[in-house]
Image: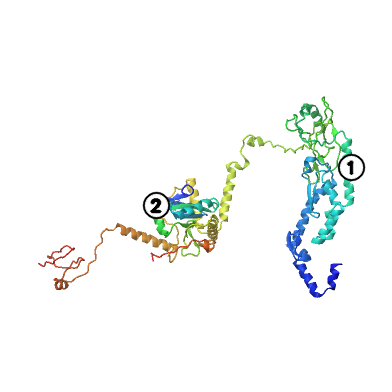
């Protein structure tokens, strides 16, 4: 989906984007262009990009790129696609009932779900919160098992 | 038999049933547009009172237009008949003016009728609007009589004058002969008109093909006057023109002044009646300002006012900075955002060189298995990275760990076969160390 959304393959690009996105939520999708779930998520992101453009920016990060591996480790990305949210270069967490609050793992069911999540993060960030609650019902949140050091 | 009397005599059980039945009967409240089974009690509910007052006030505003025409009857042109429509909310009846000769004639007649009075009374009784307000929703006979008198006068004045109202088709383009005549007889009459205008508006000296703009506008103070005609031209046609004292109102309200005056509509008429120019409205001319030509306009290709000079951009910047100051100062990363904005602006202006950040820069991130603050998790990660780098830079073959075997052990076990794993007993200098694989023999020297 690189023709629809910005795709980043270097750490420098990611850094620049994180630093230059001011007072807007930055949505970084970590995935590949070959994975089906990533493509599903990308479809939702590309369609909602315009709707959230006033308060959010979206970019895709290719996890296959070597330069970006440091971020893959830093953000503890084990499942793809994983979406990480930033606001003013600060990481925003979301409690969606899963074990991992630092990112959104999986795709969204529909555009509105994604917009709701981003809106919730924006509202929380504008109030000074670093962690927000997920507005979606549990059945629409993708489930996954989080392992600690392969245990 | 009166059902009420019957119920008075009935047993209490039946009365209760009746009450229950009343409670269960749903009726529509036209005002609130809801179905309810509250009966008469509904009229006293605050929501109903509110809806009723807005409902009636809305109808009053529409009635005020009709009352205007009641006081100032005007002749209605067919082309404008479609506009004069009123829905009578009391009678649930649409009042259109298709066949009427005067503006709001049908509406006035309806509002003065007995049926309407009955509907108003019924409505107010049913929905509790206050029976003392009946007259505000109808037209009394006295007013109706006055209006009818005025209409008669209007008709007589129109008939007596040299001009007649033409009710033929508008824009009769098939009558080409007439149109030619009309355009030919223009210049002769204009000279007569100029003297009669007191407000300084000068008409067009030449006719255009599309429309004919007439003499100026005069204030109307509510009186209807006949129109004067000017001298006829050589072709025998006549034009009507108005001066500021005499006018005929041919159309409905065009605009109104606060003092109640009205702008006039000028009509072009022909005594031969073959051509109909009906209700061409004279538009009020906006006084032109001398400086306008310098900046240009839409036709000359000048810039639009909102794309004006840089002077006007400065307030925008101020507005923008004002907007940012309105953002919550307690939002996440506020201090960082302000600092970064300043840096970016300075970079744009060229005051500072774009600083390349360290390649090892990492954003503030709260890791999954973190304990402690985010800074600690960042440090932890950096330590992990460093250790992993160090591991990579070291030698490929690591030293194998061997168990310690003492000399005595070796000597006592010398007859035994050596294990598969290599053993390097610590021996004296002059003892050979044999290769690790397979059997080996210790040679003592």
Checking the image for residue B152, the label placed there is: 1
Mark 1: which secondary structure?
helix
Q: Position of residue B195 (x, y in %)?
A: 81, 31
Residue at position x 85%, y 55% in the image: B117
Residue B287 in the image: x percent, y percent? 72, 37
For the residue pair B333 and B57, the one nearer the viewer reads as B57
Q: Residues within 10 Å of mark 2 (few under 14, many from 20)?
A: some
Q: Residue at x 36, y 59 (%)?
A: B385
Question: What numbered label is drawn on residue A102?
Answer: none
Q: Quadrant of residue B79?
A: top right
Residue at 41% in and 52% down: A11
Residue B214: horizontal and vertical position, in percent?
Answer: 78, 33
Q: Which residue is mark 2?
A: A65
Q: Is residue A133 above or below residue B65?
A: below
In the rendered image, the vertical position of residue A67 relative to residue B381, given as above or below: above
**Please, what secondary structure does the residue beneath circle 2 have?**
loop
Near-viewer residue (B78 or A26): B78
């Amino acid at each position: 989906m690189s023709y629809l959304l910005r795709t980043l393959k270097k750490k420098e690009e990611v850094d620049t984007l994180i630093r230059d996105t001011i007072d807007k939520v930055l949505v970084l999708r970590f995935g590949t262009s070959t994975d089906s779930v990533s493509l599903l998520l990308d479809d939702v992101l590309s369609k909602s990009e315009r709707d959230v453009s006033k308060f959010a920016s979206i970019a895709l990060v290719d996890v296959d790129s070597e330069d970006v591996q440091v971020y893959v480790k830093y953000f503890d990305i084990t499942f793809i696609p994983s979406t990480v949210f930033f606001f003013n270069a600060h990481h925003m967490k979301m409690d969606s009932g899963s074990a991992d609050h630092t990112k959104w793992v999986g795709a969204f069911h529909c555009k509105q779900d994604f917009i709701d999540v981003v809106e919730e993060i924006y509202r929380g960030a504008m109030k000074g919160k670093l962690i927000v609650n997920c507005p979606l019902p549990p059945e629409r949140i993708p489930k996954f098992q989080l392992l600690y050091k392969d245990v | 038999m009166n059902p009420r009397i019957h119920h008075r005599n009935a047993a209490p059980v039946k009365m209760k049933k009746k009450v229950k039945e009343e409670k269960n009967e749903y009726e529509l409240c036209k005002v609130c547009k809801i179905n309810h089974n509250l009966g008469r009690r509904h009229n006293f509910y605050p929501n109903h009172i509110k809806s009723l007052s807005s409902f009636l006030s809305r109808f009053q505003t529409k009635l005020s237009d009709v009352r205007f025409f009641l006081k100032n009857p005007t002749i209605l042109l067919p082309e404008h008949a479609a506009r004069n429509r009123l829905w009578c909310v009391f009678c649930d009846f649409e009042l259109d003016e298709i066949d009427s000769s005067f503006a709001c004639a049908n509406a006035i007649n309806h509002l003065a009728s007995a049926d309407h009075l009955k509907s108003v009374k019924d409505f107010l009784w049913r929905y509790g609007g206050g029976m003392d307000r009946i007259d505000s929703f109808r037209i009394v006979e006295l007013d109706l009589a006055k209006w009818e008198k005025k209409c008669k006068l209007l008709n007589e004045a129109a008939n007596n004058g040299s001009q007649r109202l033409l009710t033929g088709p508008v824009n009769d383009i098939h009558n080409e002969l007439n149109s030619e005549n009309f355009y030919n007889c223009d210049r002769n009459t204009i000279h007569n008109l100029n003297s009669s205008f007191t407000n300084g508006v000068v008409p067009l000296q030449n006719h255009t093909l599309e429309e004919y703009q007439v003499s100026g506008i005069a204030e109307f103070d509510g009186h209807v006057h006949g129109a004067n005609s000017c001298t006829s031209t050589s072709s025998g046609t006549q034009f009507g023109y108005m001066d500021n004292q005499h006018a005929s109102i041919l159309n409905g309200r065009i605009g109104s002044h606060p003092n109640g005056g009205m702008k006039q509509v000028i009509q072009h008429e022909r005594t031969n009646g073959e051509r109909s120019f009906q209700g061409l409205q004279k538009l009020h001319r906006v006084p032109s300002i001398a400086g306008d030509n310098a900046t240009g306009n839409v036709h000359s290709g000048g810039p639009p006012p909102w794309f004006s000079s840089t002077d006007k951009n400065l307030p925008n910047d101020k507005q923008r900075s004002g907007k940012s100051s309105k953002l919550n100062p307690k939002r996440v990363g506020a201090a960082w955002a302000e600092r970064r904005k300043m840096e970016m602006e300075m970079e744009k202006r060229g005051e500072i060189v774009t600083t390349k950040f360290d390649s090892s820069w990492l954003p503030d991130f709260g890791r999954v298995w973190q304990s402690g603050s985010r800074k600690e998790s960042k440090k932890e990660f950096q330590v992990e990275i460093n250790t992993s780098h160090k591991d990579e830079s070291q030698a490929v073959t690591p030293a194998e760990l061997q168990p310690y075997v003492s000399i005595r052990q070796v000597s006592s076990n010398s007859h035994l076969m050596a294990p598969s794993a290599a053993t390097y007993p610590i021996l004296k200098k002059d003892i050979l160390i044999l290769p690790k694989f397979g059997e080996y023999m210790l040679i003592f020297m």
